[in-house]
Image: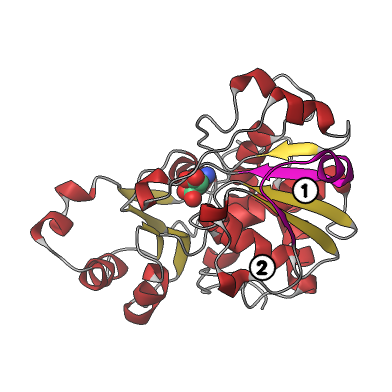
Amino acid sequence: MRLVKGNNFISLKDYDRDDILSVMQGISSYDDQNLKRFIPNNKKKLIANLFYEPSTRTSSSFYAAATYLGHEILSINNVQYSSVAKGESLEDTIRTLASYVHCIILRHSEEGAAYSAVQVSDVPIINAGDGIGEHPTQTLLDLYTIYKEFKRLDRLTVALMGDLKYGRTIHSLIQVLDLFDVHIHLIGPHELKLPLQYYKKEYIESTMLTENIAMSIDVLYITRVQKERGAVGNYAFTREDAMKLDNKCIVMHPLPRNEELGDWFDSDPRARYFEQMSNGLAVRKYLLGEILG
Ligand code: NCD
């Protein structure tokens, strides 16, 4: 599946290895010194940022990307002040916005919401996270961070640690890592295990970061407990864990973080979560560039 003008961007399910590698090249073409340059655009479009769930990075990086590309953003993030508060369905809200704008970026608390939106929209929908379903634009920035670091997506060992049950960033990321020659370790409490449908390959599972795992991994990807989705469980990346990790192992986190990743690690040269976050701008510029043409 190649991303072309007018496409929706809902899931990474239809992408193969070559597609992903060409996406990585595409993102790097947007990732230059002038990331924050405004590009005059005579094909200016209006884009709706429709957020039913809280967001800082995703909504503001889409906003910034659209603005730098010369587009305009219509932000609806306080849905309590829209007709949603009057009981309007997602479908009717999408129909309404689709008749006013050229593209809708949607974050919603229900899994599958982005697919429902596609059914009633004649403008492209970008999935900015659908409940515990997927978060494909986050996955592109996660992958791009790995790609930038290692210059490849093959021959890597990645540990996914934390809330594997409710974390949509994990659900999207694991599907794409499976396309590559990547060994995956799943680390987390039993009650937050990865749902069965995501087991496409053999993964090595454990409840903690053992010395053996720590020494073998290139990437440690930590996530928070999704308490707002009913998750219960506890874990944290500790100073002892950090000592076990190889010097070349990078530590990622989609953010926001809670107690699972303390700020004591921020100055460690292996921390990559702030780079990861800033890579979101190039990724979203690339996506809007491709989809809006
Ligand atoms: C993630 C999300 O919304 O799923 N945040 C993000 O977009 N960077 C991760 C999370 O909320 O835990």
Q: Amino acid at mark 1?
A: Ile
Query: Taking 256 as reference, is 157 left or right?
Result: right
For numbered disc 2, what is the local secondary structure? helix
Using the image, tell me which numbered label, if any, was put on residue 37.
none
Query: Taking 167 as reference, is 95 left or right?
Result: left
- Look at the image and say whether residue 212 sits in the magenta stretch: yes
For numbered disc 1, what is the local secondary structure? helix
198 shown above or below 162: below
Q: How is the image coloured?
A: secondary structure
- Rounded to the nearest whole Å, what is the CA distance between mark 1 and mark 2? 15 Å
Where is residue 131? Give x, y as percent. 40, 59
Residue 246 appears anywhere in the view = yes
Displayed quadrant of residue 156 = bottom right
The reply to whether callout 1 and callout 2 are in contact (CB within 8 Å) is no
Q: Which residue is mark 2?
A: 175
User: What residue lies at 23% left-to-right and 66% top-to-bottom?
Assistant: 93
Which quarter of the rendered picture does the C terminus lie within? Answer: bottom right
Q: What residue range appears in magenta?
A: 204-222
Q: Which residue is mark 1?
A: 146
Where is residue 252? Give x, y as percent. 68, 40
Residue 70 appears anywhere in the view = no
Give the foreground label among 1 and 2: 2
User: What residue lies at 31% left-to-right and 79% top-to-bottom?
Assistant: 120
Q: Amino acid at mark 2?
A: Gln
